[in-house]
Image (spheres, rainbow, N blue to C red):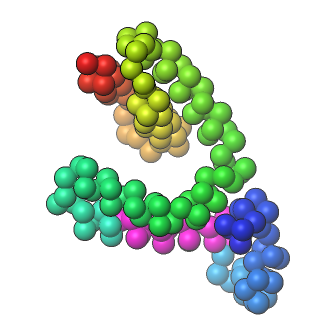
């Protein structure tokens, strides 16, 4: 249902009909459709954790290939999650804004080099840090977080530009 209909279109009623269970049975196990989704996502993360454990002795490139292969194998699932209107709209707008801003700065440094992947890479990283910051998942002051992200940006852009 997630892949076929998308998360936003799913209702508890549709879930119970598809699973051929009563609403009462559903609510014995889950608070709502978001709780069910959390359970499913946690199962995926557990699989990812097992893969990370298996690849920890590998180098960055080989480990990253394994990581991306996992996402490719589960592409429909993750695509359905990322395309949910519930969360994606704001994240996409923010990401596009960040990419645009970063692209301007990087193009000033080296206008001849194709920076699309670098810009997306750094923007996604920053978006993740911002999300963690907003959700109080980082135990650092605003200045410490900002300085570290700034240093990481400078280092990556410097490495890429030469």
- Can residue 133 be seen? no
Q: Is residue 95 left or right of residue 69?
A: right
Q: Is residue 45 left or right of residue 78?
A: left
- Does residue 39 lie above or below 137 as drawn? below
Q: Report the residue at 31% width, 19% height from top.
A: 161
Q: Residue furthest top?
A: 108
Viewer-side residue, 63 vs 9:
63
Q: Quadrant of the N terminus?
A: bottom right
Q: Is residue 59 left or right of residue 21?
A: left
- Does residue 48 lie above or below 142 as drawn? below
Q: Is residue 107 magenta?
A: no
Residue 81 is situated, as x and y percent measured from the top left of the image, at 62, 58
Magenta segment, principal secondary structure? helix
The magenta-colored residue range is 31-49
Residue 142 is situated, as x and y percent measured from the top left of the image, at 43, 27
To which quarter of the image does residue 137 belong?
top left
To which quarter of the image does residue 3 belong?
bottom right
Residue 159 is situated, as x and y percent measured from the top left of the image, at 26, 24
Residue 50 is situated, as x and y percent measured from the top left of the image, at 33, 70
To which quarter of the image does residue 67 belong?
bottom left
Q: Report the residue at 42% width, 24% height from top.
A: 114
């Amino acid at each position: 249902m997630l892949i076929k209909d998308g998360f936003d279109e799913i209702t508890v009623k549709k879930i119970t009909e598809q699973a051929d269970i009563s609403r009462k049975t559903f609510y014995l196990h889950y608070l709502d459709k978001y709780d069910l989704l959390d359970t499913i996502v946690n199962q995926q993360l557990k699989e990812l954790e097992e893969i990370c454990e298996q690849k920890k002795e590998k180098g960055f490139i080989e480990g990253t290939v394994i990581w991306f292969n996992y996402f490719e194998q589960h592409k429909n699932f993750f695509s359905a999650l990322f395309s949910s209107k519930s969360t994606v709209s704001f994240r996409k707008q923010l990401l596009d804004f960040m990419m645009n801003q970063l692209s301007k700065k990087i193009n000033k440094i080296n206008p001849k080099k194709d920076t699309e992947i670098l810009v997306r890479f750094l923007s996604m990283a920053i978006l993740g840090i911002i999300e963690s910051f907003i959700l109080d998942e980082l135990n650092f002051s605003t200045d410490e977080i900002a300085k570290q992200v700034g240093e990481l940006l400078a280092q990556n852009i410097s490495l890429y530009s030469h």
